[in-house]
Amino acid sequence: MRLRDPAPGADEIRRRLDRAGRRWGAPDRLPLAEVTVSGPRDAPSARARVRREALRPVREGPFPLRAVLVRYADATGDLVLVAARGRFSLAALDRVADVLGSDADPGGALLSPAVEPTPNGGWPAVDWGLGDPRRAGIVGSCPLTVPTGAGGAHAVRTAVALTLAGYGGAADPEVGSLDAMPSGPGAALPPVGVVITPARADRTYLPTLAPVFPLTVHGVEGPDGSFEGWCRFDEGTIAPEVADGFCASVVRLATRLAADPGAPLPARPPLVDPEQVREILRLGGAGVPSGDTPRIDRLFEEVARRRPDAVALVADDGELTYRQLDERADALAAGLRASGVTAGAMVGICLDRDTSLVVAMLGVLKAGCAYVPMDAGYPPDRLRYIVENADLRLVLAADVGSFPTMADVVVRRPAEVIAAAALDGDRTTARTSRDADAPAYVIHTSGSTGRPKGVVVPHHNVTALLAATAADFHLAPDDVWTLFHSSAFDFSVWEIWGCLLTGARLVIVSYWVARDTEEFHRLLVEQRVTVLNQTPSAFAQLARTDRRATDELSVRLLIFGGEPLDTAVLGPWFARHSHTRCRVVNMFGITETTVHVTAQTITPAEVVAGSRSVGRALPGWSVSVRDEHGRVLPPGPTGEIHVGGAGVAHGYLGRPELTAQRFILDAATGERLYRSGDKGRLRPDGRLDHLGRLDNQVKIRGHRIELDEIRSVLAADPEVGAAVVVVNQATPGDPATSRIDAYVVLTAGSDTRRVLDRARRILPDYMTPTTLTEIPTIPLTENGKPDLARLPAPTLGALAHRPDPVAPDPLPAAEPDRLAAAVLDIWSHCLRTPVTREDNFFEMGGNSLLVVQVLTSMRERQLPRVSTRDFYSNSTAGQFINLVEQRHDAARHGRT
């Protein structure tokens, strides 16, 4: 505020400040700072000093007010007042100015007694801010000017509200004002404020960034309907590029209002114009050609010709060189032809992870066919559905007798197919197709209708993925990879072909070794693995084992995929493995877009920042974030991630309507896009933040699961009247404790055990509910949707059928009893519920990751070692305790 001439001295202002402070209940004397500027009041240096004092943040406290007297060489002065907006209204700050600017009685209340600071100091969360925490407290500013006749302040407020609706996704956006603060303890504040500064000669407000609005539009309305102002923001919360984009949208919408004031505006007008759309699409990677890429089998044959004697596969059943792998795949392809399989057909593969699996995949491709992988652990009904959906006539299986019997479907072992070619006398490969656009594989993912949906992926998508990543990742023939994941999980596509198409060595990890982190860690050391691919859930257990290990790993490239990564889990890893020697990459991808879409290198800096970035699009891929109408959003606001480019699959097998719904043509570019259903936001530098799902799909231990598929299976049971399915974590933030909790309304005389048993015949293990709780009715919201917050706590496993849970056994003194008590204590801790000898680990909510936790805890307590295979064979607590006691007795007597 500008002091009248002659300006009162510092002593007089201090006297007024002390008197006012006592009247207003300030606990201490209110300080007054004094600075002197060598020039007159109107000099640039004077204006700069006033602005600097106004923008300095105020220290929060019992009476958060700062007063600074600025004296000039011409005997004039300004008094700069800075107050915490979460505690002062604009009217209250006016009153402070009135009292200190004159000798008036400071009667009346200064602070609004109903307004209290919110827990975060008054700042609401801004999901689209993308600020840099390292720049917290640095004030950014960008101009916001609306031309003559645009409606002035009213048009600006309207344009701000419409822009905010697009940025925040709110149907009724709330725009705040400093003289109309919300009331009540912890009152929520809107994310944007608009302040129209009064043009008064005696007082000039230079609003600070004390905690109220993350982004505030300030300005003066001109008599001609113009608006001259600026936007202020804290760069720790709002990125300058995002603020610029916000202001540009406000100006464009306000100008549009002026051009046709009577024209109705949509509730969600587009935030960017067509020219900006093109720039944003280029920022997300659009327009980068992927180039022509060959078929998978042809590229493999080139590698085999260059490296015939190099080891291609290492597994429990032996090793194969590239020449041997190529020859066996040729023999299988000939056997398929001799068996009547024609080019273009689909061949099922239901094999364990060993050399025969890779031989079968490559042989199917060489025969001009597409492979359809199925996990041998799938229940019969799911296997049967996949066979019918893909119209399979031949399935290659390890255990022919256990595969469901179906009419017109031949189930044979790979060796039997190869033998058929020998009997036929023809061991040549049918060169019937050189089309890289032909389907290479069909992987079935969870579907909301209660049945999985098959994703058809052509050859060139896979080879384009290798072309996009090989140079950046320095993939080379001297690398050693692992095949850790199920062939029915698309991460395996990257593991198998990423390795073999670059001439490296693939170490196939058996089912049981993959579930025992100590054995897996030992394998990584012994085989000197350099490229390791993991889901974050699996890696968390491996990292825990690595912290105790003395042997050094050779991993130079660690790639995460399959589920969101919490970078915090990498802190202990970086403590042992320098990011300069082992590159860590977080990759976002979808089965429908060929495994990977983006890549973000993770360093300790990302861990400290808690980064959610999944990086930029791979060369040849593109990402954009769009609103519910499919319109491109600028960097900052959240929306649905759309993926285009070289990785987009053909569509869903036999599902034309669903394909048309999810695979769309971009009206702006004509490019084919996949609507991911994932929530994200684009950063100003082109990186993508992945923020979860928009629908009812979840990721559990890398598996993509539609909760509606589980619900549909349960609801179809004749004893179930209604069902709802949710995902919970026994320990929040720990993915290993994620579990599927289902609730059912049963008909009279029904039993949850029977319902769960029938569900297991249809759903794979990773989709089978951990708990099944009977409820009298599904609670509903006012809109008629399931009210998940009102669901009761789930009843865990066998406890659902015991009205009086039995407490764990007490700790006895005898050695066997001590072991039993220790085991029960570990199980109870990992399962987060009391456990007795009669309880089954998996019925109590256990899963593969919790198995690892139990075994790790046992080793930390120096209990006898138990393998994962033995755990699964002894999953009842009593059986497991007997096994531990036997191992303990054997160790005491020197037996192995």
Image (tube, rainbow, N blue to C red):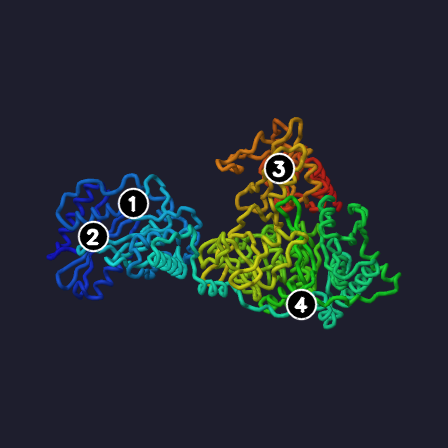
Residue found farthest to the left:
6
- Asked if the residues shown at circle 1 and circle 4 are in contact, with their CB atoms under 8 angstroms apart, the answer is no
Residue type at numbered disc 4: Thr
As drawn, 776 above or below 37: above
Residue named by callout 2: 32
Q: Earlier in the sequence, mark 3 or mark 4?
A: 4
Where disc 3 sits, the SS reads strand
Disc 2 from disc 4: Cα separation: 71 Å
How many residues crowd around disc 1 within 10 Å: few (fewer than 14), some, or many (20 or more)? Answer: few
Q: Earlier in the sequence, mark 1 or mark 4?
A: 1
Where disc 1 sits, the SS reads loop
- The image quadrant that residue 439 belongs to is bottom right
Disc 2 from disc 1: Cα separation: 28 Å
**Residue 350, position as x, y percentages in the image:** 75, 52
Residue named by callout 1: 180
| Most foreground residue, 507 or 892 | 507
Residue 813 visible in the snapshot: no
| Residue sitting at x 61%, y 29% | 805
**Residue 723, position as x, y percentages in the image:** 60, 36
Residue named by callout 3: 771
Q: Is residue 826 left or right of residue 139?
A: right
The N terminus, quarter of image: bottom left
Disc 1 from disc 3: Cα separation: 49 Å
Residue named by callout 4: 502
How many residues crowd around disc 4 within 10 Å: few (fewer than 14), some, or many (20 or more)? Answer: some
Residue type at numbered disc 3: Thr
Q: Is residue 336 left or right of residue 673?
A: right
- The image quadrant that residue 634 belongs to is bottom left
As drawn, 511 above or below 828: below
- Asked if the residues shown at circle 2 and circle 4 are in contact, with their CB atoms under 8 angstroms apart, the answer is no
